[in-house]
Amino acid sequence: MDRIVFITGATSGIGRATALLLAEKGCRIIACGRREERLAELKEKLGDQVHTLTFDVRDRKAVEAAVAAIPDRFTAVDTLINNAGNAHGLDPIQDGDPDDWDAMIDINVKGLLYVTRALLPSLIASGRGHILNIGSTAGKEVYPRGNVYCASKHAVDALNQALRIDLNAEGLRVGAINPGLVETEFSKVRFKGDEARAETVYQGYEPLRAGDIAELIWFALSRPAHVNIADLVVMPTAQASSTQVRKEL
Ligand code: NDP
Ligand code: 8X3
C-alpha cells in the first residue's frame, strides 16, 4: 500500500508491531519515540522504508521541530497512528501521585493533540488523510484504581469523535481502536519497572498480542476510501470487561 504513515510510540508494543506490519504491506513509515536505540534497530531492519524521529510527545516545540524536519521523501504524510501512551501507577485516587497524573494527561492527551495539530496540514493536503487513535477499553469504562488513566483514555475517545466531526468537511477518515489487555511493555511502565508484578497481569489466560492490534490497524487502513472504522473495541476472549477476566491459575 502506497501510504506514508506517521506512528507515535513505535519503539515497543503496538506501535512497533504496526511499523513492521505496515512496512511489510509496502507503506513508508515515520517511526517515533524517545528511545533512540530502539529506533535505530527499526532503521536497521527497514532501511530506506523508514524515517525515525526521536522526541517526547509532551514537548510541543520538539513535536513541531521534528515534524518540520521530516525529509522530502516522507513529507507527504497521509496517515497518522496516535499510539504513544502509557499508564503510570495503579492507585486509589486518594493515594495517587500527581507526577503520574501529569504524565498520563501530558502524554496520552496533550501529546496526541500536539502531534495531530502538527500533521494536520499534510493530512488535509493529501486528500486522503486518515487518523487512527489508539484508545482503550479504559476509555469506555472506569475500573478501580484506573482513575486518571481511564480519564485520559476517555479524553482520547472524546477527541476521536471531535476530530471526526471537525475534519469531516476536509474528507479525513478518523477512527479509534480500543484494546483491552494486550501483553506489551505497558504494565512494566505502569508498575515502574516491576517486571514480576507486570507479568501477573497476563498470567492464567491468553492476552492479546501487539500483532493482533497491528492487524486491526492494517484492516482499518486497507478498507476502501468510503469506509471508515470509526470506533472498534477488541478484547482477549478471556476478558469480558475491565474487571472480569477468566483466568486459570
Ligand atoms: P508500550 O509501553 O509497549 O509502548 C508505549 C509506546 O509509547 C512506546 O513506544 C513509548 O516509546 C511511547 N511513549 C510513551 N511515552 C512517550 C512520550 N512521552 N513521548 C513519546 N513516546 C512515548 O505499550 P503499548 O504498546 O501497550 O501501548 C501503546 C498504546 O496502546 C498506548 O496508548 C496505550 O495506552 C494503548 N493501550 C494499551 C493496552 C495494553 O493492554 N497494552 C490496551 C489498550 C490500549 P518511548 O518510551 O521510546 O518514548
Ligand atoms: C490498557 C488496558 O485494562 O490496563 O489500556 O486499562 S487496561
Image (tube, rainbow, N blue to C red):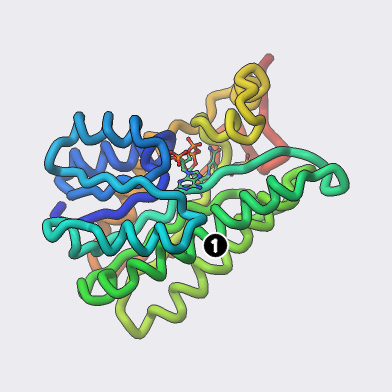
Question: What's the amino acid at mark 1?
Answer: Lys
Q: Quadrant of the rendered structure where residue 100 is?
A: top right
The residue located at (66%, 53%) in the rendering is 102
Q: Position of residue 130 (x, y in %)?
A: 31, 65
Q: At numbered mark 1, what does the secondary structure look like: helix, strand or loop?
A: helix
The residue located at (46%, 48%) in the rendering is 84
122 to the left or right of 47: right
Q: Write down the residue under mark 1.
A: 110
Q: Quadrant of ligand 2?
A: top right
Q: Position of residue 43 (x, y in %)?
A: 22, 35
59 to the left or right of 26: right
Furthest toward the top, the residue is 249
Q: Position of residue 186 (x, y in %)?
A: 55, 35
* Viewer-side residue, 236 vs 111: 111
The residue located at (42%, 55%) in the rendering is 82
* Viewer-side residue, 117 vs 14: 117
* Viewer-side residue, 229 vs 13: 13
Residue 214, above or below 2: above
Q: Quadrant of the rendered structure where residue 24 is?
A: top left
134 to the left or right of 181: left
Furthest toward the bottom, the residue is 169
